[in-house]
């Protein structure tokens, strides 16, 4: 694994997770807990797409697949230890918004990688 792939997968994966975590803590005081994920998700999607289009310059779908897997693992593992274990939500943590978040974390890098690869082929 090269240095840039490590930075893009572990570095951006952690930063993106941390942005969502921070937004969750900040918004917790003004947004009902059952709506928190739905409020954060559009913001997270926009930031993630910005990172994928502006900060990651790879042209290999395999590269984006590695990013997708690592970002998803970071989201699942960090959510478990820093949300589920730390806050122990009374009504549970894993609901539709969380599962959608995990699916999008996996799919967005793959979709952007595919899009970038098809744009390169067409040029």
Image (cartoon, rainbow, N blue to C red):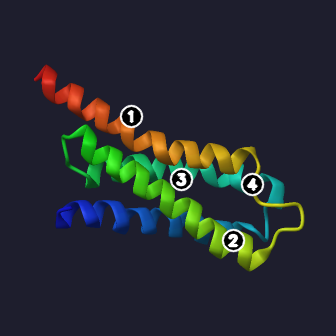
- Kindly identify which residue carries mark 2: 83
The label on residue 94 is: 4
Position of residue 65 relative to residue 121, above or below, is below
Can residue 53 be seen here? The reply is no
Residue 80 occupies which quadrant of the picture?
bottom right
Q: Secondary structure at mark 3?
A: helix
Labelled pair 1, 3 in contact (Cβ < 8 Å): no
Instruction: Please state the horizontal and vertical placement of residue 81, each as a whole percent of the image.
Output: 64, 74
**Which sits earlier in the primary sequence, circle 4 or circle 1?**
4
Q: CA distance from mark 4 to mark 2?
A: 11 Å
Position of residue 10 relative to residue 118, above or below, is below
Q: CA distance from mark 4 to mark 1?
A: 25 Å
**Which sits earlier in the primary sequence, circle 1 or circle 3?**
3
Check disc 4: other Cα within 10 Å, few if <14, some if 14-19, many if 20+.
few
Position of residue 47 relative to residue 10, above or below, is above
Labelled pair 3, 2 in contact (Cβ < 8 Å): no
Q: Among all residues in the image, which is located at the extreme right?
A: 90
The label on residue 111 is: 1
**Which sits earlier in the primary sequence, circle 3 or circle 2?**
3
Q: CA distance from mark 1 to mark 3?
A: 16 Å
**Which sits earlier in the primary sequence, circle 4 or circle 3?**
3
């Amino acid at each position: 694994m090269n240095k840039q792939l490590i930075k893009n997968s572990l570095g951006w994966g952690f930063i993106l997770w941390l942005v969502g975590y921070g937004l969750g803590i900040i918004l917790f005081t003004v947004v009902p807990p059952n709506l928190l994920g739905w409020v954060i998700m559009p913001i997270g999607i926009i930031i993630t797409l910005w990172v994928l289009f502006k900060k990651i310059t790879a042209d290999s779908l395999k590269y984006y697949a590695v990013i997708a897997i690592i970002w998803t693992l970071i989201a699942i593992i960090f959510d478990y230890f820093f949300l589920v274990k730390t806050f122990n939500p009374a009504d549970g943590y894993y609901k539709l918004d969380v599962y959608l978040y995990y699916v999008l974390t996996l799919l967005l890098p793959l979709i952007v990688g595919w899009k970038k690869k098809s744009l390169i082929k067409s040029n």
